């Protein structure tokens, strides 16, 4: 199926709603709202991407980059489209376009799929935030790529 990646900008309201719908499915504990996506797209340091297969939104990426320091806030792929390189492509776009010198992220300690994805991109575990997540309560692994 043909895929395309789009950088979202302020005003892409249909895409913000589609990202939020996928969020509710994938992060039911603390889903981002359409407004959260809109705020990221509108922020000077924000970076928001989505992937479409035909007209269906099947993946998205939210991050920031300021003065060379980046943070990955959200990466997700529709369960029906996993292991096809969608998340990897989105991270690649972010690294290629924003060129962060260093990038940080937090991930649930039990989220083996995501930890594997980040390791694939050279992220290393640099710390733990105890009981960072709720419903269920869980530690966050802090990962870093770069200097
Ligand atoms: C984690 C997630 C974003 C991966 O998306 P994806 O599009 O399937 O990932 P990709 O196909 O781009 O995978 C790239 C690489 O990451 C690693 N990887 C991804 N999913 C993996 C899995 N389930 N098991 C092991 N390795 C995995 C592999 O190294 C993979 O390369 P390979 O397929 O050539 O072996 C997806 O599983 C997801 O949406 N999970 C729920 C949301 C989430 O937890 N997001 C992260 C929050 S911090």
Image (cartoon, rainbow, N blue to C red):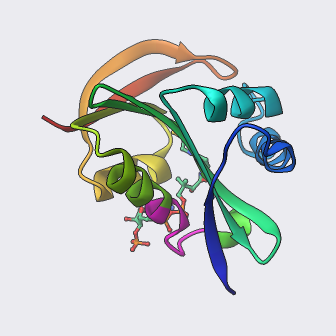
> Where is residue 114 drawn, in percent x and y?
47, 49
Name the residue located 28 percent from the left edge and 39 percent from the top edge. Answer: 100
Q: Is residue 56 left or right of residue 143?
A: right
> Where is residue 83 drawn, in percent x and y?
53, 71
Q: Nearer the viewer, residue 114 or 145?
A: 145
Name the residue located 33 percent from the left edge and 56 percent from the top edge. Answer: 96
Q: Is residue 100 left or right of residue 135?
A: left
Quarter of the image that includes the C terminus: top left
Q: Nearer the viewer, residue 7 or 88?
A: 7
Note whether 130 is above or below 136 in the view shown.
above
Note whether 15 is above or below 80 in the view shown.
above
Q: Is residue 118 magenta?
A: no
> Where is residue 137 drawn, in percent x and y?
60, 18
Quarter of the image where one finds residue 102: top left
Residue 74 appearing in the image: no
Q: Is residue 47 left or right of residue 8?
A: left
Name the residue located 51 percent from the left edge and 59 percent from the top edge. Answer: 87
Q: Is residue 85 magenta?
A: yes
Q: Nearer the viewer, residue 96 or 113?
A: 96
In this picture, which residue range is highlighted in magenta?
Answer: 82-89
Quarter of the image where one finds residue 21: top right
Note whether 11 is above or below 78 in the view shown.
above
Q: Nearer the viewer, residue 147 or 132?
A: 147
Q: Is residue 103 left or right of residue 109?
A: left
Q: How many marks?
A: 0
Name the residue located 69 percent from the left edge and 87 percent from the top edge. Answer: 1
Note whether 84 is above or below 138 in the view shown.
below
Q: Which residue lies most toward the left here? A: 147
């Amino acid at each position: 199926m043909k895929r395309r990646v789009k950088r979202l900008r302020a005003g892409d309201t249909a895409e913000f709603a589609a990202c939020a719908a996928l969020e509710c499915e994938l992060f039911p504990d603390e889903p981002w709202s359409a407004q959260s996506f809109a705020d990221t797209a509108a922020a000077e340091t924000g970076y928001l991407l989505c992937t479409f297969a035909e007209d269906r939104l099947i993946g998205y990426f939210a991050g920031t980059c300021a003065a060379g320091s980046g943070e990955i806030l959200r990466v997700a792929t529709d369960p029906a489209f996993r292991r096809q390189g969608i998340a990897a492509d989105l991270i690649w776009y972010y690294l290629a376009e924003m060129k962060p010198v260093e990038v940080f992220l937090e991930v649930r300690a039990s989220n083996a799929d995501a930890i594997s994805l980040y390791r694939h991109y050279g992220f290393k575990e640099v710390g733990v935030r105890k009981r960072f997540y709720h419903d269920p309560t869980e530690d966050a692994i802090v990962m870093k790529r770069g200097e």
